[in-house]
Image (cartoon, helix red, strand yellow):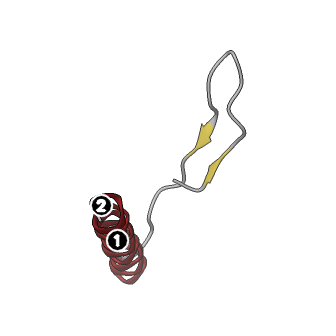
C-alpha cells in the first residue's frame, strides 16, 4: 500500500503500488513486522494499566 487517503462517508481511498524487487519486499516486510511488534507492546501496556 502506497497511501491511504482520508476516510469519508463514501469510503476510504487506498492507493497500491507493486513491489519491484526482492530487497524492497524484504524492507516492507520488516516494516510491517516492526509495526506489529510496536502495536502488540502498546496493547500489552494498555491491558496492564487497565487491570491495575
Locate residue 25: give its quadrant. Answer: bottom left
Tag 1 secondary structure? helix
Q: Which residue is mark 2?
A: 47
Locate residue 2: give its quadrant. Answer: bottom right
Furthest-top residue in this view: 10
Whole-angstrom CA distance, mark 2 to mark 1, is 5 Å
Q: Which residue is mark 1?
A: 45
Residue found 39% across the figure and 69% down from its top: 42
Mark identifier at residue 5: none
Q: Position of residue 21 (x, y in %)?
A: 40, 75
Residue found 54% across the figure and 48% down from its top: 16
Q: Of 37 and 21, which appears nearest the observer? A: 37
**Residue 40 appears left or right of 15:** left
Q: Position of residue 45 (x, y in %)?
A: 34, 71
Q: Of 25 and 42, which appears nearest the observer? A: 42
Locate residue 5: give its quadrant. Answer: top right
Q: Quadrant of the C terminus?
A: bottom left
For the residues bearing labels 2 and 1, Cβ distance under 8 angstroms: yes
Q: Of 27 and 7, which appears nearest the observer? A: 7
Residue found 72% across the figure and 39% down from its top: 6
Residue found 68% across the figure and 32% down from its top: 7
10 Å neighbourhood of mark 2: few (<14), some, or many (≥20)? few
10 Å neighbourhood of mark 1: few (<14), some, or many (≥20)? few
Is residue 26 positioned above or below 17 on the image?
below
Q: Position of residue 9 (x, y in %)?
A: 69, 16
Tag 2 secondary structure? helix
Amino acid at each position: 500500500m502506497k497511501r491511504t487517503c482520508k476516510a469519508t462517508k463514501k469510503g476510504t481511498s487506498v492507493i497500491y503500488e507493486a513491489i519491484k524487487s526482492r530487497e524492497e519486499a524484504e524492507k516492507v516486510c520488516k516494516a510491517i513486522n516492526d509495526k506489529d511488534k510496536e502495536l502488540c507492546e502498546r496493547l500489552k501496556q494498555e491491558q496492564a494499566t487497565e487491570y491495575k
